[in-house]
Image: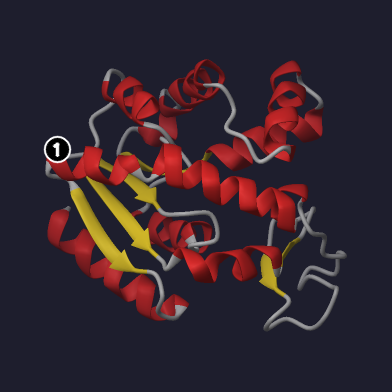
């Protein structure tokens, strides 16, 4: 059976870090809509330029654009044995659209106290070259391990973060109830350390898959 996994959680919950570990553990591709959009933005494609307007403002990219990109990605050959979606779906409308093109095996919600997230997000720095992610709370250098200079993404700045968390609360949080009703939702405590969260998610998925 295909391992079709969705990772849910508010911005800054650590989904990206955990997604890499999950994908490696189960040998499935980590599909991040954020990465797909950023690739299109870097390449200056029409969809990338349009997406940038929304992302920079802390708003969701329109469903028809996102769904089309995800549909194309899930049809690629490396998704035959399963996939991990990170950053999609973000609304119940997107979840309903996904149900029409794929069967979801397990949904893991990385649950973090929202009042802790703003500081976590605004402290994040990323590498524009290798994609590495760091926190200024623990990483005191401006350099990535690969040697490139770290940057702060526009959507990680304070005003944009407030908008992103508001969007999450109104549009994305209802997905938790959507997948709970379908009987595929599991919850991991994202307030713990990275390794502890990873271990909890591994236990959840080992029992499900």
**Residue 30 visible here:** no
**Residue for badge 1:** 182
Question: Along the line of sight, which residue is nearer the eye, 176 or 49?
Answer: 176
The percent coordinates of residue 62 (x first, y second) are: 56, 22
Q: Quadrant of residue 112?
A: bottom left
Please tell me whether residue 113 is drawn above or below residue 11 in the rendered image: below
Quarter of the figure with the N terminus = top left
Can residue 90 be spotted in the picture? yes
Q: Residue at x 41, y 35 (%)?
A: 89
Horizontal side, residue 65 vs residue 201: left or right: right
Residue 138 vertical position relative to residue 15 in the rendered view, above or below: below
Q: Residue at x 69, y 81 (%)?
A: 137
In the displayed structure, would residue 12 be above or below residue 58? below
What kind of colouring is applied to the model shown?
secondary structure
Label 1 crowding class (10 Å Cα cut-off): few <14, some 14-19, many 20+? few
Image coordinates of residue 192 in percent, x first then y, are 40, 79
- Residue 68, position in %: x, y? 50, 17
Q: Residue at x 38, y 59 (%)?
A: 22
Asked if residue 149 lies left or right of residue 102, the reply is: right
Q: Residue at x 72, y 37 (%)?
A: 57
The image quadrant of residue 105 is top left
Of 21 and 194, nearer the camera is 194
Residue 103, percent across and down?
Answer: 23, 30
180 relative to 58 in the view: left or right: left
Element type at mark 1: helix
């Amino acid at each position: 059976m295909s391992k079709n996994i969705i990772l849910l959680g508010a911005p800054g919950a650590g989904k990206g870090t955990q997604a890499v570990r999950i994908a490696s553990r189960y040998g499935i591709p980590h599909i991040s809509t954020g990465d797909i959009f950023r690739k299109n933005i870097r390449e200056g494609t029409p969809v990338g330029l349009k997406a940038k307007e929304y992302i920079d403002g802390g708003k969701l990219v329109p469903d028809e654009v996102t769904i089309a990109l995800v549909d194309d990605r899930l049809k690629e050959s490396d998704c035959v044995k399963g996939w991990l979606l990170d950053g999609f779906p973000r609304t119940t409308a997107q979840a309903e659209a996904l149900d029409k093109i794929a069967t979801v095996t397990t949904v893991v919600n990385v649950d973090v106290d929202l009042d802790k997230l703003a500081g976590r997000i605004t402290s994040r720095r990323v590498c524009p070259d290798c994609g590495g992610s760091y926190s200024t709370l623990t990483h005191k250098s401006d350099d990535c391990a690969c040697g490139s200079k770290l940057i702060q993404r526009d959507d990680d700045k304070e005003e944009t973060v407030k908008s992103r968390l508001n969007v999450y609360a109104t549009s994305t949080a209802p997905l938790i109830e959507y997948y709970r009703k379908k009987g595929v939702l599991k919850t991991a405590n994202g307030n713990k350390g990275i390794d502890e969260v990873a271990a909890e998610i591994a236990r959840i998925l080992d029992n499900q898959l």
